[in-house]
Image: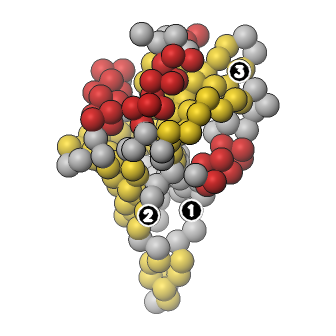
Amino acid sequence: MAVVVALTQNGFAADQGRKRIGVFNDWQAYTLKTGHNVVCYAISVPKDTSPKTVVRHGKRVKISRGDVYVTVTNRPATETAGEVNVVIGYTFRKNSQVSYTIDGHRHKLFTMDDGAWAYDAKSDKSIVRAMERGKTLVVSGTSGRGTDTKDTYSLAGFTAAHNAIDKACNVK
C-alpha cells in the first residue's frame, strides 16, 4: 500500500487539505478540502501491469509510464457521486475507449489525455455497483504510440472504501 501513499502525496491529492479516512485492503479512502468544499475519493493502484516491455526500432525497451490508478470520487458541491476515473500513465490514442472489465463484465469509458471516465452518471452508478460485487478489475487501453496495455486491480476493500467516502461526504 506504500505505492498508493506515495501516489497520493504526489498525484491526485497533493493538496494540503488531504486527510486519509482509512486503508481498506487494496483501497484507500481520503477527503480533500478545497476552499469550503470537500471531495471524498477511494483510490487504488494496479496489482499487475502489462506489457512490461515493447519492441521499438528493433530493440526491446522497458515501458515508461507515469502514475497509474483508479479513483471513485464524490463531489457534494456539484452533486457528483461515485464518479469513476482511470489515470493510465500515458496519453491515450485519440478517440479511443478504455475497456473497464469487472469479473468478465465489460464497460466502456471515454478517454481524454491520460484519463478515462464513464459516459454518464448512470454508467458510473452501474460500474460502482459492479465493483462492490466484484473481485478483479481489468483496465485495457491503447497509448498514443499504439501500445495496448492491461492493468489488473484487486477490488478487495473497495466496498468498505466506497462506504467510507459516502459517509464522509454525506452521500445517500
Tag 2's secondary structure?
strand
Q: Measured along the vertical axis of the image, is residue 4 above or below residue 163?
A: below
Residue at the image position 52 percent from the left and 10 percent from the top:
170
Name the residue type under label 2: Thr
Mark 1 burial class by Cα count in 10 Å: few <14, some 14-19, many 20+:
few
Residue at the image position 68 percent from the left and 51 percent from the top:
6
Q: How is the image coloured?
A: secondary structure
Residue placed under numbered mark 3 in the picture: 33
Residue 49 is tagged as: 2
Residue at the image position 50 percent from the left and 88 percent from the top:
59
Tag 1's secondary structure?
loop
Between residues 56 and 157, which one lies in front from this camera angle? 157
Quadrant the C terminus occupies: top left
Report whether 5 appears left or right of 162. Answer: right
Q: CA distance from mark 2 to mark 1?
A: 10 Å
Name the residue type under label 1: Arg
Using the rendered image of the protein, determine whether residue 104 is visible from the camera's viewpoint: yes
* Residue contact between numbered discs 1 and 3, judged by CB atoms under 8 Å: no
> Looking at the picture, how far across and down is residue 149, in whole percent?
39, 62
Q: CA distance from mark 1 to mark 3?
A: 29 Å
Residue placed under numbered mark 1 in the picture: 65
Tag 3's secondary structure?
strand
N-term mark: 3 or 2: 3
